[in-house]
Structure formats: C-alpha cells, structure tokens
C-alpha cells in the first residue's frame, strides 16, 4: 500500500493521474471501511451510529468525549471474567479474560457526554464461560462528569458492589477516565486519519499520501482544494508536511468549508452545516472502524452483552431480537425499559418459558380461542390457588430465591423490615419501605403530579395516542376502562398514565395528586396478564376486560382524576388503605396488590395536565420508562403557575 518514503517524495501533480491511483484509492477506502462487516454481526450497532448522526446536539449541551479505560480487576475467586460498560442506550463489552482472580482487560471506549444526557456509566462484572449464561457478580457506577476538569488519565480503584446487597463489596476494578477538550478531540481525529496514509510512519506526509486520503473521502470540493491546502501547510516548499501541522490546517478548513460530508468509515451522510455533530460522529465512528478500541459495541444492555455463543447462534438464526420499542414487548423474547434515574436501558427479568406461553396465548388466534373455551376461568382458579399458597407459612422459604432471582432489581436496604420479619411470601411481596426511601417531587406544589408506583410507565396525551403507540386491543376505550359510573365526557379525550408493576417491584401504589376521594367502583372481569405481550395483542383487551377498581379523586389543580387499579394473573386481591371522603396528599399510600404483577392507570380530564416531555417521548417510541414513586409526572395546565418550576434535568431522582 505504500509508495516510497514521505521525505524523498517530491510534490508532483502527475501523481493524481498515475496508473496506480485508482487501485490505491480503492485499497484505502477498504481500509477505512474495516468494520462494516462487524455492523452486520450486531444489527443494533449500525442503528446506534445512525441515531448518533441524527441526534442533533446543541453546542451548549456538549460536554465532551469521555475516554474510559477498564484496566484490571481483583475478584475473590478464579474464573473467566467479562466486563460491560453501559451508558444511556449503548452497552460495550471487553474480551473474556483467562481463568484468574485478577483479570486484565486494558479496554478503552470513548463515550459521548451531554449536560442533559446520560453521564452515569454502569460497569458490570460477569463470571462467564462459553457454554452457559454469564453470572453477574459485581457492579459499580461512575459519574463521568466528575472527570470533566481533570487533565490527567490516572488509574483509580473502585469497589464492586454485590448486586443483591449494595453494602457488600465483592471485589475491585481499576480504571481511568478523562474528558477530551472538543478542539483537541477534533485535532486528534484528524491526526489519526492522516496517520492512515503515513505509509512509512515517519510522522510526515507527502502530497501523494495526502492526495490519496482526500480522494478517498469522495468529496469533489475537497479534491479540488487538496493542492492549495497542502501548499499552505508546506511553508518551506520541500514537498513534505508534518501530520501535526496538516491536522491543524484541516481542522480550521473543516470549520470554514467542510472537506468531509460522508463518514469514511460507516458511509453515513453527514450534514455539512452541523460541525459539532460531524466531529462527534467522525471521532467515535473512526475509533471503532480502525480498531483503536478493544471493547465490542452494538449491545443495548449488559445482560445482552454478557451472553455467550449460544446467544450469538440464536441472534444469527433470528430466534430472538433485542430492539427498543414495541417489538421488544410484543414480538420478541426480551422486554427492555428505559431507567429514568440512570438514563440507561435495562432488561426486565422474566422466565423464557413464561414469555413463550404468553406469546402463544395472547399473540395468536389459537390463543384467543383458548380464552373463549374456559381459559379465563382457569386463570381465575390459578390466581386464587396461588394467592392461598403465597399466604401460607411454607411460602416464606421462597423469599430468598425470589430475591436472588432479582438481585440487581430489589434493593433490600430500602425495605422497612429485614427478611426474617416476613412470615409468608405475600408479606414480603407487599413489603413497606423505610420512611424517606421515595422522596416526593415538589411536595409543596399541588399543581405538580407525581408517579403513583415503582413501575414501568407509559404516558399519552390522549387515548388515541395510546392506541397508536401501545394498546393494540380492538375494543379499548376510556369508557370501557372506567365504566359508566366514573367516566364522563371530560375523560374521553383525556390524558393517560399507565403504571405497570412487575413482580420484583415494590407493590404499594400511591396518590399522584392531592385531593378528596369521591367514590370507589368495583368492576368485575378476567385476570389476563398485564405484560406488554398481552397489552400489545390485538386479540384481547387487557385493561377493559380485567377485574379492576376505579376511584374518582377530586382535585383543585387537575379537576377530576380517575385512578384505576387493575388485577392480573396471580394477583389474589387489591387492597385499599383509604376510604371514600378521605382527603389525601400526593405521595400518600393508596393501597397494594398481593402476589403478581399488576397495573394502575390514571386518567386526567382533557387539557388539565402537561406530562413531562421525556415520558411522552419514550412512550411515542413504544418504550416504557422505569420510574419510582414520587418522581415527577407532569404539571397542571388548568391554571397558570405562580412560580417557576425547577429544571427537570437538574432534579436528583
């Protein structure tokens, strides 16, 4: 690929028309496209690149690019170890170490940081082998913004926490992190791309080498200017220019009249008017394409990234699919939700056999036929039997196994009583939390509504939006949900907030608003699952067919608010801790569900609430948001606010 040394090669325009030009350019383009085949191996990787270029980042929101290096770890036993880094909707993994208790990776990843975006990276450590699934042993969370003012890339030691008990240390990881200055990031990118054509690696370029690179960009404007640019950098006229000098010149030129309008690595068309996003795209994409980083990308969650070759076979054969949005709940074998606190995608833990059975029942006409032939009564009987079992003293032995299954999703330090306090499984299932474990947002502001449960939330401006993005039942309606005793014309086009509780969640629900309880109405029905697989089914109407209780709350700031507690498969009962006529404050406990997952739906009257933008945006992607009791839901539009609300992005959730 080389053609002589930089120092001995004179500046000669005839190089442009030499017979070997086309072959050199072809080879260079192939080198720039090194990682295109890796894109096809992980379909979501190309999606993440596409999303990166389409995500228009404002200059004032850009912090920089974090260079995170996972060096090594010290564990308490020997095994083969894998480390994953998750930030926002992207996850990256290291190679698997040798059998050891002191794995070494020296893996580097560059991550985009925004002031308003995700900045807390989760590092997960798995013990793994090639035949079975990996086991999460420890994790830590690093706030990358803390490194913003640091100039050095010093090694530091961080304790790894036990996923089931955050106070227990299971090992240590050694890492370093630094934030690149935006200007230096751009210069660093240009230096690296220029070094590709430094064939003899002497730090200098001849015009022929520089010309090869410019022609590989495929930009005619750049091709026409290459002679002019090179001469401007070649001050002494010897036909050789240092990479550092040329890099600075190209950075300035890229700002004035961009030379690159198509990413030479992934082929993405880049908006020439958006210099900041161009620089970010090229920097991150080029690092992966040239193999400068050891970590593998293209994953959405650390659980997905930690799977071994059996998972890869299933992915290639399209037996399963990791996608953000509706398919992740209805058509695939995984359910992904967006954690509002960490701004990271997480995978909901659910047994694969249960997913398979739910898809068979709720996503097929055959399953619908089974429903009509007695399956409804069967679900009722199963739920009642399971409810009795979970109330027995023998059921207490299942508590440790349940906690272990959801070890990174149940925080025992928040629970009011120790595990030995619970005499039955249901006592643990309806556990209370310690006072203050769930702070209530803007407690002094009754015109700010809050989340009613620890749950996966979907929110929609209107019922029509909910049908377009989430609920696929043919007969769903607000009237059917609320019943004639509660529903009024104001609710028909009102705003919906759907709070879905999974089995591992804290199962007490709370008031989202302050007001007076006017009435409770029992509505009989079935006990379908409230899992997205059923909600997204066109063959049944989970929310309007299930057993439920509708409560009407009268408020000063939101008008009437309908609060619907919906039963589900394995839910033995819905218990309320308040009665008609009670005045309640937002955040007060309203009741609880016994064993099983279930759902609460709040319906606000038309034009009375503005749901927070992040919740609506996720819901429009058919992506549930993981929230906790007391997080902000929205603000009243019924009357103007007298004081300015705090910025939602600056609130500690």
Image: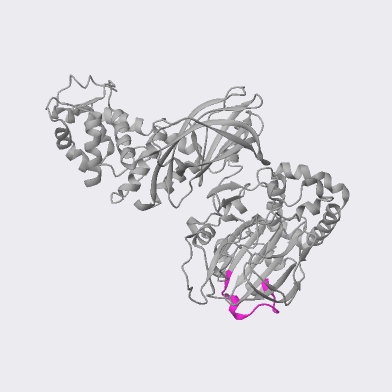
**Region of the chain picked out in magenta, as a range:** 481-495
The C terminus - image quarter:
bottom right
| Residue 257 seen anywhere in this rendered image of the structure | no
Q: Is residue 466 left or right of residue 241?
A: right
Q: Where is residue 535 in the image (x, y as percent from the top left)?
A: 65, 60
Viewer-proximal residue, 240 or 540? 240
Residue 292 versus residue 99 in the image, above or below: below
* Residue 576 part of the magenta segment: no
The N terminus - image quarter:
top left
The mark total stands at 0
Viewer-proximal residue, 324 or 321? 324
Q: In this view, does 301 lie to the left or right of 4?
A: right
Viewer-proximal residue, 557 or 361? 557
Q: In the image, what residue occupies the spot 64% across and 48% down?
A: 348
Q: Position of residue 402 (x, y in %)?
A: 75, 45
Q: Which residue lies furthest to the left in this view?
A: 237
């Amino acid at each position: 690929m080389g053609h002589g040394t930089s120092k001995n090669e004179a500046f000669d325009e005839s190089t442009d028309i030499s017979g070997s030009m086309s072959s050199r350019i072809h080879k260079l383009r192939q080198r720039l496209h090194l990682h295109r085949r890796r894109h096809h191996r992980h379909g979501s990787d190309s999606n993440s690149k596409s999303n990166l270029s389409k995500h228009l980042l404002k200059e004032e929101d850009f912090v920089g690019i974090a260079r995170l290096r996972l060096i090594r770890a010290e564990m308490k036993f020997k095994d083969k170890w894998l480390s994953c880094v998750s930030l926002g909707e992207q996850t990256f993994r290291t190679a698997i170490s040798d059998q050891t208790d002191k794995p070494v990776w020296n893996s580097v990843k560059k991550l985009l940081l925004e002031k308003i975006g995700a900045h807390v990276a989760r590092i997960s450590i798995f013990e793994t082998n090639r035949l079975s699934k990996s086991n999460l042993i420890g994790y830590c969370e690093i706030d990358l913004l803390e490194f913003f003012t640091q100039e050095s890339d010093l090694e530091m030691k961080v304790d790894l926490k036990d996923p089931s008990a955050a106070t227990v240390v299971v090992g240590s990881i050694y890492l370093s992190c630094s934030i690149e200055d935006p200007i230096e990031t751009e210069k660093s990118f240009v230096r690296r791309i220029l070094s590709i054509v430094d064939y003899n690696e002497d730090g200098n370029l001849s015009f022929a080498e520089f010309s090869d690179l410019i022609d590989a960009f495929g930009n005619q404007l750049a091709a026409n200017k290459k002679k002019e640019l090179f001469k401007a950098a070649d001050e002494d006229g010897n036909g050789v220019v240092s990479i550092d000098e040329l890099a600075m010149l190209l950075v300035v030129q890229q700002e004035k009249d961009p030379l690159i309008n198509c990413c030479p690595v992934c082929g993405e068309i880049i908006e020439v008017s958006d210099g900041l996003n161009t620089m970010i795209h090229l920097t991150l994409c080029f690092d992966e394409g040239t193999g400068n980083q050891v970590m593998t990308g293209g994953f959405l969650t650390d659980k997905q990234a930690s799977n071994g070759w059996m998972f890869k076979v299933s992915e290639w054969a399209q037996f399963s699919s990791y996608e953000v949005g509706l398919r992740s709940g209805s058509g695939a074998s995984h359910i992904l939700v967006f954690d509002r606190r960490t701004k990271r995608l997480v995978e909901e833990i659910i047994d694969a056999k249960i997913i398979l059975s739910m898809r068979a029942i709720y996503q097929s006409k055959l399953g619908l036929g089974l429903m009509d032939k007695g399956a409804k009564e069967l679900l009722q009987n199963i739920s009642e039997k399971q409810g009795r079992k979970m109330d027995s003293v023998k059921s207490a032995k299942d508590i440790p196994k349940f906690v272990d299954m959801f070890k990174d999703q149940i925080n025992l330090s928040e629970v009011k009583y120790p595990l030995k306090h619970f005499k039955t499984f249901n006592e643990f299932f309806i556990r209370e939390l310690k006072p203050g474990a769930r702070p209530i947002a803007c407690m002094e502001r009754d015109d700010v509504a809050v989340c009613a449960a620890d749950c996966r939330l979907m929110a929609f401006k209107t019922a029509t939006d909910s049908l377009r993005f989430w609920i696929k039942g043919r007969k769903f309606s607000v009237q059917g949900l609320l019943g004639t005793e509660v529903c009024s014309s104001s609710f028909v086009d009102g705003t919906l907030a759907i709070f879905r509780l999974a089995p591992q969640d804290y199962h007490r629900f709370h008031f989202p608003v302050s007001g007076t309880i006017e009435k409770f109405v029992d509505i009989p029905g079935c006990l379908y699952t409230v899992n997205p697989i059923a909600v997204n089914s066109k063959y049944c109407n989970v929310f309007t067919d299930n057993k439920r209780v509708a409560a009407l709350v009268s408020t000063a700031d939101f008008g009437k608010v309908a609060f619907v507690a919906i039963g589900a498969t394995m839910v033995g009962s819905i218990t309320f801790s308040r009665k008609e006529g009670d005045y309640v404050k937002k955040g007060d406990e309203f009741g609880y569900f016994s064993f099983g997952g279930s759902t609460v739906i709040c319906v606000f009257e038309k034009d009375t609430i503005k749901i927070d933008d992040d919740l609506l945006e996720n819901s429009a992607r058919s992506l549930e948001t993981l929230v906790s009791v007391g997080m902000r839901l929205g603000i009243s539009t019924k009357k103007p606010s007298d004081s300015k609300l705090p910025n939602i992005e600056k609130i500690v959730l």
